[in-house]
Amino acid sequence: MNKKYERYINYIVNDIELPYLKYLNMYGLKQDEYKLILSKLYNQPVTIGDNYVYDKNGNMIYYEDIDGYWYKREYDTNNNEIYFEDSNGYWAKREYDNQNNLIYREDSDGYWGKREYNSNGKIIYYENSNGLWIKKEYNEYGDLIYHENSNGDIEDNRR
């Protein structure tokens, strides 16, 4: 790789203050040069569109507006969003099971929520940081037969 690009990559990688798109103007880079640098930075081909950067799967991984507000996203190998962060200091992270069901979420506001699923992908338990919880049961046909929650509501259609 050209020494000029290596130097820019080092600046970008070592600069903990985003936004990335400022480098187009700051270093007088052309968009194709910057695309090459970001591809090296993310270890994959990227696409740049106006204020957006997309990964090789078409997922938006970075956005920046003219006022300097930015956010970035990360995805797992199944294209599920696993992390979000913005320039206001807000962040959120998510975890998924092997069937791509969301099983846990938490954010910088202190909120968290977790879910459990049956083998058919239906939620059987939910709980969050606000004290809400829900329990559900289904019959062999996938019909809801039992529902109970933290408000004291119970619906029992088990036989």
Image (tube, grey):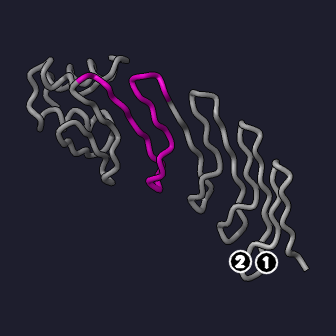
Q: In which quarter of the image is residue 12?
A: top left
Contact, mark 2 vs mark 1 (Cβ under 8 Å): yes
**Does 112 sit left or right of 5 as displayed?**
right
Q: What element carries label 2?
A: loop
Of 4 and 95, the residue lying toward us: 95
Q: Where residue 60 sits in the image (x, y, percent)?
A: 33, 45
Amino acid at the residue labelled 1? Asn
Decide: is 61 above or below 125.
above
Q: In which quarter of the image is residue 61?
A: top left
Of 11 and 52, the residue lying toward us: 52
- What residue is shown at x 72% (from left), y 56% (from top)? 116
The segment highlighted magenta reads: 67-90
**Does 50 sit left or right of 54 as displayed?**
left
Amino acid at the residue labelled 2? Gly
Which disc is residue 142 wearing? 2
**Does 113 sit left or right of 158 as displayed?**
left
Please say whether residue 139 is one of the residues in the magenta stretch. no
- What residue is shown at x 31% (from left), y 44% (from top)? 44
Quarter of the picture holding the N terminus: top left
Which disc is residue 121 wearing? none
Decide: is 55 above or below 139.
above
Q: Mark 1 points at which residue?
A: 139
Quarter of the picture holding the C terminus: bottom right
- What residue is shown at x 27% (from left), y 31% (from top)? 64
Label 2, residues with CA under 10 Å away: few <14, some 14-19, many ≥20: few
Please say whether residue 71 is one of the residues in the magenta stretch. yes
Q: In which quarter of the image is residue 157?
A: bottom right
Q: Where residue 136 sits in the image (x, y, percent)?
A: 78, 63
Q: How far, Cα to Cα, is label 2 from label 1?
A: 5 Å
Label 1, residues with CA under 10 Å away: few <14, some 14-19, many ≥20: few
